[in-house]
Image: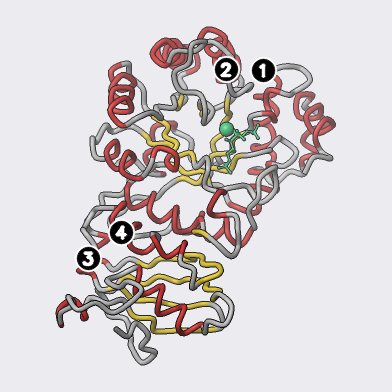
Amino acid sequence: MGYVDLSYRPGKNDLVCEFRVEPANSISIRKAAGAVAGESSVGTWTDVNTSKPYIKRLAAKVFEIRGNCIRVAYPLELFEPGNVPQILSSIAGNIFGMKIVKNLRLEDIHFPKKLMKSFHGPELGISDIRKITKIKNRPLAGTIYKPKLGLNPKEMADLAYKIYSNGIDFSKDDENLCSMKFNRFEDRVVKMLDVVDKIKTEHGRNVIYAPNITAPAQKMLERAQFVKDHGGKCIMIDIITSGWSALQFIRDQNFKMIIHAHRASHASFTRNKKQGIRMIVIAKMARLIGVSSLHTGTVVGKLEGSKQDISKIDNFLRSDLDRIKKVMPVASGGLHPALIPEVIKLLGKDLIINCGGGLWGHPDGPESGAKAIRQSIDASVKKIPLKKYAQTRKELRLAVERWSAVK
Ligand code: CAP
Ligand code: MG
């Protein structure tokens, strides 16, 4: 069966994928490209006698080859509407292990409208997050409790009170904090949401707490329900380690809670420039399914990610996409007050900025750490140079002194 047709022009119902293909030794790019299109649609390593004209029409077509970059069109009938695992088992499945390719990377994916319609997108998006928090013109100031494991619910709640009272808008569990001997999920949620209520009463602010419900799907459901029953506005899911099916399952319960998506483990397949899946593909799937906020990187900070890649992802999450709501990008990983202005300059204001170590490591403690983060955001929004703003603000000054050399 022929899977390469450079005269083919994709129709409005085709799903189009962009791959970077590096053929194995002595294999032509055309042959490798054909194998990618075949294995990811209806083919296998040889022609089979059971094929029929209808099945031949379902074959994906390589319609462009430019150096190592190819574009492949897939007919809509290959995909089960609304089924993310099925779609990815096709276009991001066996192909990565084929011996005929030395390296293969899925670089981007373009959905036809008809397939997009089978997804709900976020129940709550950027505008809802802004409505809930009543924060209009600046990024949200966020944090992750550190150390990532070991604090108990009471300790976390005490810290939460200190940081929310001093300007933090959003706080979350770490990716590996679920329900542990030293910190049971239910106990934590009750204590943390009490603090959220207290902040509302004392300060009139709607702050957000994102408890990590990551677990086997049934447990996730119970935990999400528990958060809802206790008045929570947000749940967090490790979307890669939980899996797409679990994410779809929770999203489709329509809990009317913010779904904060952490992407722990993504770099195991997004980081290698030659092999795996680019983060933009993950962001597209996550938005279609319906997360409300998604970790996308910082450019600066401790974790890998180029400006070009992260801007593309953030711009996609904030772009108009039919009726699908916009997703709030989350900049996190090695951030501290001295880096915040640069992050805002690079990635814009529709952002949650998370500082973990960059809050809890403040020399004067959590209250000052929280204040320094807000001061840095405020300086940036008011377009006042950080060092100048810090002259009259001790918390910011100490943070800048401690970390300005840490990029
Ligand atoms: C950040 C963090 C986040 C990362 C995830 C951590 O802590 O809590 O999980 O940001 O990466 O555990 O590293 P720090 P990404 O602020 O102390 O670095 O946002 O790129 O998905
Ligand atoms: Mg973390």
Asked whether disc 3 touches disc 4, contact meaning CB atoms under 8 Å apart, the reply is no
One can see residue 171 in this view: no
Q: Residue at x 30, y 73 (%)?
A: 43
Task: Give the Cα distance between marks 1 and 3.
Answer: 50 Å
Question: Crowding near pointer 1: few (<14 within 10 Å), some, many (20+)?
Answer: many
Mark sitting earlier along the chain (3/2): 3
Q: Residue at x 24, y 36 (%)?
A: 254
- The residue under label 3 is which amino acid type? Lys
Mark sitting earlier along the chain (4/2): 4
Quarter of the image where one finds residue 293: top left
Task: Give the Cα distance between marks 3 and 2.
Answer: 47 Å
The residue where tag 4 is placed is 87
Looking at the image, is 7 positioned above or below residue 51?
A: below
Label of residue 367 in the image: 1
The quarter in which the N terminus is drawn is bottom left
Label 1: which secondary element: helix
Asked whether disc 1 touches disc 3, contact meaning CB atoms under 8 Å apart, the reply is no
Mark toward the viewer: 3 or 2: 3
Question: Crowding near pointer 2: few (<14 within 10 Å), some, many (20+)?
Answer: many
Between 130 and 106, the one nearer to me in the picture: 106
Label 2: which secondary element: helix
Label of residue 114 in the image: 3
Asked whether disc 2 touches disc 1, contact meaning CB atoms under 8 Å apart, the reply is yes
- The residue under label 2 is which amino acid type? Ser
Mark sitting earlier along the chain (3/4): 4
- The residue under label 4 is which amino acid type? Ile
The residue where tag 2 is placed is 165
